[in-house]
Amino acid sequence: MTNPVQALNSARVRGWLYQALFLACALAVAWYLVSNTLTNLATRGVATGFGFLHREAGFEIGESLLSYSASDTYLKALVVGLLNTLAVSAAGVVLATVLGVLIGIARLSSNWMVNRFATLYVETIRNVPLLLQLVVWYTIMNRLPSPREALEVVPGIFLSNRGMKFPVLVEHAGHGWALLALIAGIAAAIAIVRHGRRHREATGKPFPTLPAAIAAVLLPPALVFVATGAPLAFDVPVLSGFNFEGGGSVTPEFTALLIGLSVYTAGFIAEIVRSGILAVPHGQTEAGLALGLSPGKILRLVILPQALRVIVPPLTSQYLNLTKNSSLAVAIGYPDLVSVSNTSANQTGQVVEAVAMMMVVYLIISLAISGFMNWYNRRVALVTR
Amino acid sequence: MSKQFPADQAPVSAGPIPTGPVPPAHWAASYEEEPTQASAPPQANGMTALKPFGWAKDNLFNTPLNTVLTLACLGLLWLVVPPAANWLLLKASWSGSSEACREAAGACWSVIVVKHRLIFFGTYPYDEQWRPFLACALFVAMLGASGVRAFWRPWLAGAWALTLVGMGVLMWGGVAGLSYVPNDRWGGLPITLMLSVFSIAIAFPLSILLALGRQSSLPAIRTFCVGFIETMRGVPLVSVLFMASVMFPLFLPEGVTVDKLLRALAGMTLFTAAYLAEAVRGGLQAIPKGQYEAADALGLSYWQKTVLIVLPQALRIVIPPIVNQFISAFKDTSLVTIVGLYDLLTAATVATTDPEWRPYFAEVYVFAGLMFWIFCFSMSRYSQWLERLANRYTRR
C-alpha cells in the first residue's frame, strides 16, 4: 500500500490532481462571469431566456427568400437572415470556385502574359482587406446610374443603382417534369458509374462509364423538355417609368457582397489549385504516357485523383472562410444572420442569447463542412499497408 | 543569400574521395546553385533569351491557343491601360480645391493631399499629430528590424518592450510635458498597427499553451483546449468582436468598465490565439517522436522536455505560418470598424463622406488599399523568403 506522499509521485495521480485543480478554476471563473452577467442584466431590467423569439420583431428586412413582414416573430426574422447568409454563401462558393480554378490554371500557363495577369490578380486581391474591397464594390453599386440610364452589360441584364435585373424563365408545368427527369438521370448515372467500376474490376475490360453517365444525366430531361413542347419563354425586364418591371432582380447589397466574396476567395482558391497541380510530379504524366494512356485518361485517372487529394482539404476551409466572411455583410447593410441578430439584440437587449444563437448556427455550419471534409479525406487518403 | 550557403553542403558535393585537385568549397557551392536556378524556365529559353523575337515565339506564340490568349491579353491591355494611365497619372489633378478636380478628367489626388492627416491619424488632436506619426515610424522601424535574422537575440524582446512603452507615452501623453490624449480620440494607422501587433504578441504565448493543451494526455485540459480552438475557428471574427464589445461589459462586476479599444483587442487576441494554436500544433506534430522519447529517456520532466527540447524545434518550423497569420490579423483589424473603432478603413470612409470631396471616393479607397497592400505584400514576400530559408537548412 502506498501512503499519500508516495502517491503524489505517480504521474496518474498528479494528472488527476492537475485536472481537478483546472476544472475548479474554470468553474470558479465561469460562475463569477455568469453571476456578474445575471446581476447586470437584472439591474438593467433585461429579460433572460429565449421567450423573445416568439414576440413580434417589428423591423423590416430589405430582402428575403421567405415572405416576411415587420409583424412576424424574431424567430422568423432570424431564419430569414440565416437563409440570406446561406444564399450568398452558396452563390459565392460556386462563383469563387469557377473563377479560382480558371486563375489557378492561368498561373501555370506557359503563356507569359496570361501567367503575369493571373499573378497580378492574386497578389493584389490577397493583400487588400476583404472589408475594404466590399466597401468599394458597394460604393460602386450605389453610384451606378439610375434605372433610366441603366447599363446593359449583356442584352437583357441591366445594372443600375437599384441592383441587377435579369430575365427569368416563365414557369411552366414542363419544367417540373424536366427537373424530376434530371434527378432520375443523376441517380441512373451514379448506378452506371458503380456498375462500370464493378464490371471493370470483375472482367478487367474497360466500360464506357463517362459517355454512358453523361447520356444518363442529359438525355431524360432533354426528352421530357421536348415532349412537353419546349416551353422557353423569358420574362425580360422592361423599363417603365422610373424603374424596371418584370424579370428577376437582386439588390445592390447582394450583388456587391457576392462579387466581393467571390473575387477575394478566388485569389486564395487559385493558389490552392496551383499548388495542388504542382504537387503531382511530372514523372506521373510520363509514366501514364509510357503505359499508353491517352492524355484525357492521364488527366482523369492519374493527375486529378492525386491533385484533388492535395486540393480538397484547403479548398473546403476556403469555403468555410467564405461562409464566415459573408458576415461582413453587416458593414454594407445586407440583412444576413449577423445583421439580423444584431438588430434583434439591440431591440430586445438580450445580447447574450442573440450572440450565442449566432455563434451556434455558424458552429453547426462549420461542423457540417468539416465533417464532409473528414469523410472525403478518409475516402481519398492513401491506403498504406 | 547565396554567400551564406551552408557549410555542410560543401563536403557532400566535393565528394568523399579527393582525387586530383579538389576545387575550393565555394566553387562546389556555386556549381550546386547553378542548375536549380537555370532549370526553372524550359531549356529552349536559355538559348533564345537574348533575342526578343525568339523569346516571344517561345513564350507567347508557341501554340495556336497561346497565340489567341496572347492576343486577348493584348486587347485587354489596350482597353485597360490607356484609360487607367490617364485617370491615375496623366489627367489627374494633384493639388488645389475640389473645383479644380471637377474640371480635370482624371483622378483627384488633391483629396489625399487635403485629407491625408484625417486618413492616417483620425481624430487625434491636429497639432499633436507628430506624436502618432513618430509612434508609427518607431513601430515600422522595429518591425523591419525584427525581420533581420542577425537581430533574433534576447535583447530584441527588450527592445520591443521599450518600443511599446515609448509608443504608449507618445500616444497617451500626460507625462514629460505632453498633453493627455484619451484613447477614444486615437484613430487611423496607429490603431491598425497597434491592434494587429498587440493581438499577435499577446496571442502567441496563449497559443503555445493552447497547442500544448490540445496535445496533452489529460482529458479535461485537452477537451477544454479543443473546445476553445474549434469554437473560435468555427465562428466569424465579426461575431467574436460583437461578443467582445457588447458582452464583455456584462461579464464584469458593476462599476468596472473596460474601454472599447481594449475590448476589441481582447476579442482579436482570443480569435488570433485559436488560429495560431493550430499553426503551433503543426510544428509540435512535425517533431520526430524520437525527440520526445529521447527527452523521456534522459529523465526530463514534462516542462523541461517541452521548453528545452520540443518548443525550440517546433517554433522554428512555425515561423512562416506565424507571419502568414500576422498578415491575416493585419487585414482583419479592418473589421473593428464594425464595432465602431476608428481604424485606417473607418478613417478613409469618413474622409469620403465630406460633401465637398464626396465624388472622389475611388481615390481615397485606392490610397487606403495601397497602404494595406504595401504592408501585406512586403510581409508575404518576407514569409516566402523565410520559407525558402527554412527549406534550405532542412534540405540534405
Image (cartoon, coloured by chain):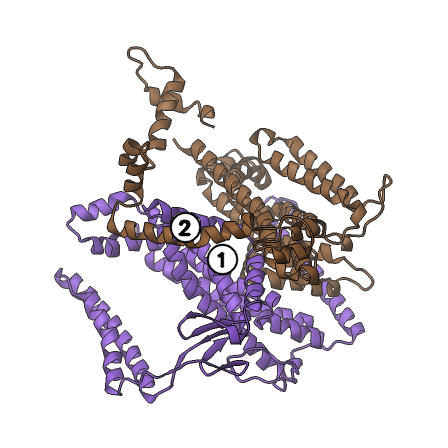
Chain colours: A purple, B brown
Q: Give the amino acid type for the residue marked by disc 2 in the picture.
A: Ala
Residue B87 image label: none
Residue in front for this viewpoint, A38 or A319: A319
Task: State yes or no: discs 2 and 1 in contact (Cβ < 8 Å).
Answer: no
Instruction: Tell me which corner region of the image, top left, top right, bottom left or bottom right, holds residue A281.
Output: top left
Residue in front for this viewpoint, B89 or A330: B89
Does label 2 or label 1 sit earlier along the sequence?
A: 2
Residue in front for this viewpoint, A35 or B11: B11
Q: Where residue A118 sits: x, y (%)? A: 41, 50
Instruction: Tell me which corner region of the image, top left, top right, bottom left or bottom right, holds residue B332.
Output: bottom right
Q: Where residue B9 sits: x, y (%)? A: 39, 24
Chain letter behind tag 2: A
The Cα–Cα distance between marks 2 and 1, rounded to whole angstroms, is 13 Å
Q: Label 2, on which residue?
A: A118
Mark 1 Cα within 10 Å, few/some/many (few <14, many 20+)? many
Residue A264 image label: 1
Q: Residue furthest front?
A: B103
Q: Residue at x 53, y 66 (%)?
A: A256
Mark 2 Cα within 10 Å, few/some/many (few <14, many 20+)? many
